[in-house]
């Protein structure tokens, strides 16, 4: 993720004022009030996945407030989804108080007044999601605003793991892949929120589909690994090899077939981008996990009806 701001290289006495000037007055448009200002710590890192903006945030204990004067500076209508990894955050909005911690995520509107009470040092992942795109994913056509979602089990856990995977692995991906994964993330979040208390995490169709999306997101982030094996995929996603095959039975292809298809599609995208013409076809194949250029050419022609070199000449 790209670093937006950090207090690490500043003198302790100057950190709080620098945070206010660089972040609160410019980046997010909020007021902050920290009681311990002599040795403030904080950073913000950011990554974009299509319409979704993800930030990795470290905050010292403080209260954050957004009021109408801040909202007037916004040029977008969106929601925040918060996944706390350390500490606790109380979200106050619309007369409600949501208790957010490593086991409970909070969702609230960025376009309405709110207060955040950060208890202790807080590390969180925030998602900024456009209202229209997110609301369209709900079964009743509307989003439950100012609510919480359990992240220690079921679909909520899958959503939190999906988010953490993108934060850790998403930076090297190209824009096309990140946009696709942003859409998948919104799908999983909407499903988790829409299910609410009905989600008991039995492996019903909804939970299995959400887990499949999470596994696919992890694979997408590791397509460039030449040693990507089914055993590695299963272990890294906390499922058995048998369960991995079960999940992909929900699709029309096997795990291996899906990986091959995604690698070929990513190669096609790279080969058609003018700014990457300096890469040879062999380099593109190797970078996307193929160990043989002849095998790559064969399966590429089988899928697209022409060779990689024919595509480059068009």
Image (spheres, grey):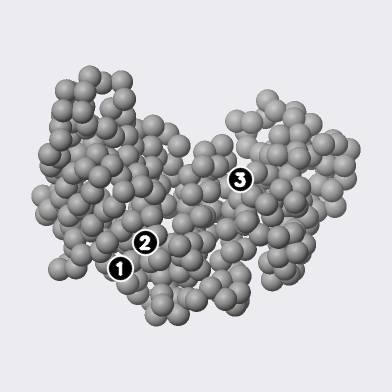
**Residue 253 occupies quadrant:** bottom right
Q: Residue at x 56, y 71 (%)?
A: 207
Measuring from the top left, give residue 271's x and y in whole percent: 69, 38
Q: Which residue is mark 3?
A: 221
Q: Is residue 313 above or below residue 163?
A: above
Identify the disc placed on residue 41: none
Q: 10 Å neighbourhood of mark 1: few (<14), some, or many (≥20)? A: some
Q: 10 Å neighbourhood of mark 2: few (<14), some, or many (≥20)? A: many
Q: Residue at x 47, y 52 (%)?
A: 163
Q: 10 Å neighbourhood of mark 3: few (<14), some, or many (≥20)? A: many
Mark 3 or mark 1: whose residue is earlier in sequence? 1
Q: Which residue is mark 1?
A: 147
Q: Nearer the viewer, residue 34 or 296?
A: 34
Q: What is the distance, in whole Å, between disc 1 and disc 2 at their CAs? A: 10 Å
Q: Nearer the viewer, residue 251 or 160?
A: 160
**Quadrant where the image shows the C terminus:** top right
Q: Residue at x 28, y 42 (%)?
A: 121
Q: What is the distance, in whole Å, between disc 3 and disc 1 at their CAs? A: 30 Å
Q: Is residue 91 above or below residue 269?
A: below
Q: Which residue is mark 2?
A: 104
Q: Marks 2 and 3: in contact by CB < 8 Å? A: no
Mark 1 or mark 2: whose residue is earlier in sequence? 2
Q: Is residue 10 left or right of residue 113?
A: right
Q: Residue at x 70, y 39 (%)?
A: 225
């Amino acid at each position: 993720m790209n670093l937006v701001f950090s207090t690490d290289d500043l003198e302790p006495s100057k950190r709080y004022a620098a945070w206010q000037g660089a972040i609160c007055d410019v980046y997010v448009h909020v007021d902050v009030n920290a009681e311990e200002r002599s040795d403030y710590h904080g950073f913000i890192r950011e990554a974009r996945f299509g319409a979704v903006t993800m930030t990795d945030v470290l905050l010292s204990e403080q209260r954050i407030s957004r009021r109408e004067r801040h909202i007037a500076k916004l040029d977008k209508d969106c929601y925040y989804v918060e996944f706390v990894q350390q500490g606790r955050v109380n979200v106050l909005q619309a007369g409600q108080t949501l208790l957010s911690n490593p086991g409970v995520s909070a969702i609230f509107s960025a376009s309405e007044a709110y207060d955040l009470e950060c208890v202790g040092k807080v590390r969180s992942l925030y998602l900024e999601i456009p209202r229209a795109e997110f609301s369209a994913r709900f079964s009743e056509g509307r989003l439950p605003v100012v609510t919480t979602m359990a992240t220690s089990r079921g679909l909520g856990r899958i959503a939190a793991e999906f988010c953490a995977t993108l934060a850790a692995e998403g930076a090297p991906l190209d824009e096309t892949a990140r946009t696709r994964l942003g859409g998948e993330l919104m799908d999983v979040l909407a499903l988790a929120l829409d299910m609410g208390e009905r989600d008991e995490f039995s492996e019903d169709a909804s939970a299995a589909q959400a887990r499949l999306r999470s596994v696919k997101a992890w694979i997408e982030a590791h397509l460039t690994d030449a040693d990507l094996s089914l055993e590695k995929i299963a272990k890294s996603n906390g499922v058995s090899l048998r369960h991995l095959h079960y999940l992909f039975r929900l699709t029309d292809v096997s795990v291996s077939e899906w990986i091959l298809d995604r690698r070929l599609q990513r190669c096609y995208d790279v080969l058609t981008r003018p700014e990457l013409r300096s890469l040879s076809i062999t380099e593109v194949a190797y970078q996307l996990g193929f160990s043989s250029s002849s095998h790559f050419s064969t399966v590429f022609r089988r899928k697209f009806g022409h060779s990689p070199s024919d595509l480059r000449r068009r």
